[in-house]
Image (cartoon, helix red, strand yellow):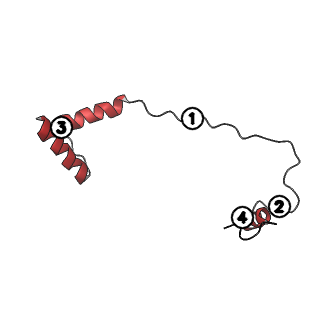
Amino acid sequence: MRTTIRIDDELLRRVKERAATSGRTIGSIIEDALRVALATPAAEVAPVRPLPVYGGSGVLPGVDLSSAAALRDLMDDGVSIDALR
């Protein structure tokens, strides 16, 4: 079957070189590469471990979860500016 695809110029140059040195057609080189790519199973995604949950009554007093600046200031409280660099 004939089809049209877009291939990176450098990749096409390498395919043409491989075809010329091996005495094969560009199409057969691409077909073999596709067979290998499709035969290899997709990498399995590792399951996400659940985050630990600790008992408590919620957010500490004075913590504003809606403000990133307030959280940053609270986390940096008592830390010297040199330690933050």
Per the image, label 2 sits on a secondary structure element best described as loop
What amino acid is labelled 1 in the image? Answer: Ala
What amino acid is labelled 3 in the image? Answer: Gly
- Give the residue displayed 31% in from the left and 31% down from the top: 36
Is residue 27 left or right of 79 when viewed as pictured?
A: left
Q: Where, by quadrant of the figure, is residue 3 drawn?
A: top left
Q: Where, by quadrant of the figure, is residue 48 drawn?
A: top right
The mark that comes first in sequence, 2 or 1, is 1
- Give the residue displayed 14% in from the left and 35% down from the top: 22
The mark that comes first in sequence, 4 or 3, is 3
CA–CA distance in space, label 4 to label 2? 10 Å
Read off the residue under disc 3: 27
Read off the residue under disc 1: 46
Asked whether the viewer can see residue 51, the reply is yes
CA–CA distance in space, label 2 to label 1? 34 Å
Read off the residue under disc 2: 63
Give the x, y percent position of residue 61: 88, 59
- Give the residue displayed 10% in from the left and 35% down from the top: 23
What amino acid is labelled 4 in the image? Answer: Ala
Give the x, y percent position of residue 59: 84, 54
- Relative to 6, does residue 65 appear above or below in the rendering? below
What amino acid is labelled 2 in the image? Answer: Val
The mark that comes first in sequence, 4 or 2, is 2
Give the x, y percent position of residue 24: 13, 35
Give the x, y percent position of residue 2: 18, 39
CA–CA distance in space, label 4 to label 3? 55 Å
